[in-house]
Image (tube, rainbow, N blue to C red):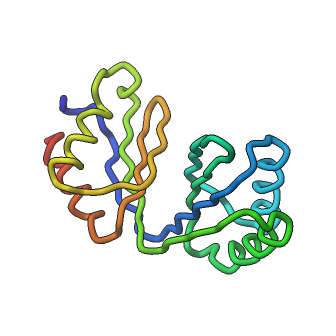
């Protein structure tokens, strides 16, 4: 990877990853879910979704300091939408790689995926923008992931 493409490589280990399964494919339904979370005061970070045949799955992350508020939101969600299955994990961290030059550089995501793959670092969620990629990975791999990416850009 060319030097100076990435200006930030950071591991953040104080997050919670939440997975909502059996979510109805209906924009009003999805909006209600995020309203319940927002109404509880939870600040959401990464959001990704997968559309399945009859339903969807939504994953999101938040800071672990929002745990109590998240619990309130989840109880409210389960009451309002009993079909939703909620899973959460605090045994994860977020790997963030970013750089303004990423939007003009081809292959950055490919190189990061290769670094993770070559080091057998599993990930469970990925979100992107033009200038950043964030991965949810198990906490015990977070330091290794940061180290290997930094080695690749030096």
Q: Position of residue 136 (x, y in %)?
A: 42, 57
Observer-nearest of 50 and 91: 50
The image quarter in which residue 63 lies: bottom right
Give the total of numbered labels: 0
At x 70%, y 65%, the residue is 42
Q: Work out whether 8 lies above or below 111.
A: below
Query: Where's the C terminus, which quadrant?
Result: top left
- Looking at this view, name the residue that lies furthest to the front: 53
Q: Position of residue 13 (x, y in %)?
A: 41, 68
Observer-nearest of 50 and 70: 50
Q: Position of residue 65 (x, y in %)?
A: 59, 75
Give the left or right position of residue 32, taking residue 59 as reference.
right
Give the left or right position of residue 142, taking residue 39 as reference.
left
Q: Work out whether 68 lies above or below 154.
A: below
At x 34%, y 69%, the residue is 139
Query: Where's the N terminus, which quadrant?
Result: top left
Q: Position of residue 73 (x, y in %)?
A: 76, 70
The image quarter in which residue 99 lies: top left
- Looking at this view, name the residue that lies furthest to the bottom: 68
Give the left or right position of residue 22, taking residue 61 as reference.
right
At x 60%, y 43%, the residue is 52
């Amino acid at each position: 990877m060319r030097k100076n493409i990435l200006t930030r490589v950071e591991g953040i280990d104080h997050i919670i990853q939440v997975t909502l399964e059996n979510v109805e494919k209906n924009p009003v339904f999805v909006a209600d879910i995020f309203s319940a979370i927002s109404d509880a005061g939870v600040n959401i970070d990464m959001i990704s979704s997968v559309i399945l045949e009859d339903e969807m799955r939504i994953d999101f992350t938040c800071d672990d300091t929002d745990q109590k508020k998240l619990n309130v939101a989840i109880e409210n969600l389960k009451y309002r939408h009993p079909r939703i299955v909620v899973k959460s994990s605090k045994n994860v961290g977020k790997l963030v790689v970013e750089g303004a030059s990423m939007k003009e550089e081809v292959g950055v995501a490919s190189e990061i995926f290769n670094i993770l793959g070559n080091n057998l670092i599993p990930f469970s969620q990925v979100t992107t923008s033009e200038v950043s990629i964030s991965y949810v990975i198990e906490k015990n791999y977070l330091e290794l992931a940061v180290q290997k990416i930094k080695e690749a850009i030096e």
